[in-house]
Image: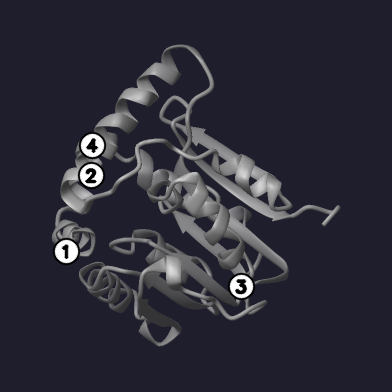
Amino acid sequence: MRNLIGYDRLASVYAILEWLMFGRDLQCARVALLDKIPSANQVLILGDGDGRLLTELLIHFPRAKVLSVDQSSAMLKRQDHSVSLVKAIDRIEFCCVDATTFKPERGKYDLLVLPFFLDCFDAPTLTTCLPNWLSGLNDDGAVYLVDFVQPESGYARWRGKLLLWIMHAFFQIATDLQHRELADLPDLLATLGWQQTERIDRNNGLVTSRLYVRSSST
């Protein structure tokens, strides 16, 4: 249970640790493409931690019903508090479960939100789990990905490797996170038939916000 206990312990200091390492870049990335997302009435969000993107989503989409999935009860409590402050508690449902075992209702959702979540998994795990999570989207559904990606070359790539190594080493100690290699998330989504329509990068290409829809060929 070290993984779960570790995330529970981080809940109260997660935002501070994030700011110390990345400043406002991660929060800016979370909200970077909200204006580009099509109207969404049913939203599934996985692993939003303390709920900073969740709150912004509920404000941005005042009619949306949201299911938030996280394995940490402490993180969900912080989400609940944040949602209550914006008076949207009647539009949110929380599910405390390991996302690798979570099966969404097929075709229910207009939007799947993945905020700094997929980087917690290695490529083999994502190859199994990502199609399951995507199955919750309807035919016109979209994916909003906010996460770390490996910069392509030069100084940015070496800097990115160092920062990712530090981050993964910390989470390995704090939560027993095992893997150290960042999966190629855009490639995985493309392989599964999703095409990118919007993209904003920051922090020298280490942090990305991307919007995906189903490829016209799928």
Amino acid on which the number 4 mark rests in the picture: Ala
Amino acid on which the number 3 mark rests in the picture: Gly
* Extreme residue toward the right, this view: 217
Amino acid on which the number 1 mark rests in the picture: Ile
Q: Which residue is mark 4?
A: 169
Quarter residue 156 falls in: top left
Q: Which residue is mark 3?
A: 136
> Are dots 4 and 1 in contact, CB under 8 Å?
no
Of residue 201 and residue 49, the one placed in the foreground of this image is 49
Horizontal side, residue 216 vs residue 54: left or right = right
| CA distance separating discs 4 and 2 | 5 Å
Quarter residue 128 falls in: bottom right
Q: Position of residue 63 (x, y in %)?
A: 55, 79
| CA distance separating discs 1 and 2 | 13 Å
> Are dots 4 and 2 in contact, CB under 8 Å?
yes
Element at label 4: helix
| CA distance separating discs 2 and 3 | 30 Å
Q: Measured along the vertical axis of the image, is residue 92 above or below residue 134?
A: below
Q: Residue at horizontal 44%, vertical 24%?
A: 204
Sequence order check: which comes first, mark 2 or mark 3? Answer: 3
Q: Which residue is mark 2?
A: 172
Element at label 3: loop
